[in-house]
Image (spheres, grey):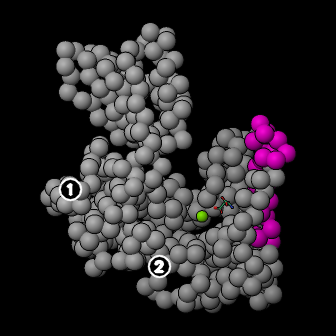
Amino acid sequence: MPLLVMKFGGTSVATLDRIRRAAKRVGREVAAGYDVIVIVSAMSGETNKLVGYVEETSQLYDAREYDAVVSSGEQVTAGLMALTLQEMDVPARSWQGWQVPLKTTNAHAAARIVEIPTDNIMAKFGEGMKVAVVAGFQGLGPDGRVTTLGRGGSDTTAVAFAAAFAAERCDIYTDVDGVYTTDPRITDKARKLDRIAFEEMLELASLGAKVLQTRSVELAMRYYVRLRVLSSFEEQSDEAGTLICAEEDIVESKAVNGVAASREEAKMTLISVADRPGIAAAIFGPLSEAGVNVDMIVQNISEEGRTDMTFSCPINQVARAEKALGEAKSAGDLNFREILADTNVAKISVVGIGMRSQSGVAAKMFKTLSDEGVNIKVIATSEIKISVLIDRKYTELAVQALHDAFELEKA
Ligand code: ASP
Ligand code: MG
């Protein structure tokens, strides 16, 4: 039997009525001849509520009990979905993470999937079960206790099941109808993409296009899982949604396929550090140990053996970065005159696999921004991405101008 994984996010299972609509979609795939593994999220708002209970009860909570509480939302929807399917005469049963068992690392609240044995579920398919409804987000740790995969983790559950069971496809039903060229709230010219390459989606996902948990895309890329993102509120058709697939499945790509904006960035500059071997290590070693996610790095030209070093990091890590660098200075591992933190920046990125073979993208990006009078503070590039830091107040202007310049409204 061909097998399909269908994942329903919180808004798609928010009420009993919506669970019924989702179940009907599952029923159609069963009628079309598929065995289906359904992954469900908690009803929308439920996980937030549970996290709130935990935080109100205990400030420095035990992560194992956090997992015991917050994993319960998915337990409810898995049971309800199985019941709904049974009411429609579709042979279905629910599975908790520990029953599969979906084995994870011991990192409670942020566990990673280690293994998904397929024998239990396959045996039930062999006995005539048509749908296995699996609670997303949760697993079983080596300590024998329930774990969760981090917020948004049921996307990762879905992709991991699709990989483990060699599913034909993994359909992610959500409240948006696909992946867009940019945030539709910033410009109404944003266009839904029919296809996007894994690499592009990874760049867009980690840059603030919050459609899928980043880890789910990494996993899909590693195991070649064809991922489709589509709305559970619209009628189904074969072209619905966005297919996230390997580069080879995209015939011809424009140089740029998306513009992403992230407002949660900060720019930090260390003034007057010694320009000598080992200086970068002396700065970025302590930052990495302190868990600061450094993104862009620029070292200025040196004068009389001193230079300035600029880097960007998430805005909520500025205090941590200052502390780590201050301690390194006190310990005598590092010397600088002062640290400047600019917390009024945004990172704007253009992304496209076509950049590998087409030139002139950077020049066009910089010209477009300069025509709008937007000053660029830091630039970083990779093979398929160019990012700049600019003043945050120009975020919308920059995104709209770049979306126009690269003609993203046209397919
Ligand atoms: N319910 C969990 C959350 O809200 C997992 C998920 O929906 O992906 O983060
Ligand atoms: Mg989600």
What residue sits 50% from the left and 78% below the top?
A: 177
Residue tagged 1: 370
Q: Farthest residue in the top direction?
A: 332
Q: Amino acid at mark 1?
A: Ser
Comparing 200 with 377, the one in front is 377
- Residue 241: give its label: 2
300 left or right, relative to 7: left
Q: Secondary structure at mark 2?
A: loop
Badge 2 or badge 1: first in the primary sequence = 2
Q: Is residue 63 magenta?
A: yes
Whether ligand 2 has any atom under 8 Å from the Cβ at mark 1 is answered as no
> Can residue 237 be seen from the camera position used here?
yes
Q: Which quarter of the image is occupied by the N terminus?
A: bottom right
Pointer 1 local density, CA inside 10 Å: few below 14, some 14–19, many at least 20: few
Q: Report the side of 57 relative to 265 (left or right).
A: right
The magenta-colored residue range is: 55-79
Instruction: Return the x and y of residue 75 as percentages of the image width and height.
Output: 79, 64
Q: Is residue 30 a member of the stretch shown in magenta?
A: no
Q: Residue at x 58, y 62 (%)?
A: 155
Mark 2 is surrounded, within 10 Å at the Cα level, by few (under 14), some (14 to 19) or many (20 or more) other residues, namely many
Instruction: Please tell me whether the stretch drawn in magenta is mainly helix, strand or loop.
Output: helix
* Residue 400 quadrant: bottom left
Quarter of the rendered structure image containing ligand 2: bottom right
Locate residue 378, reporting x and y percent. Answer: 29, 43
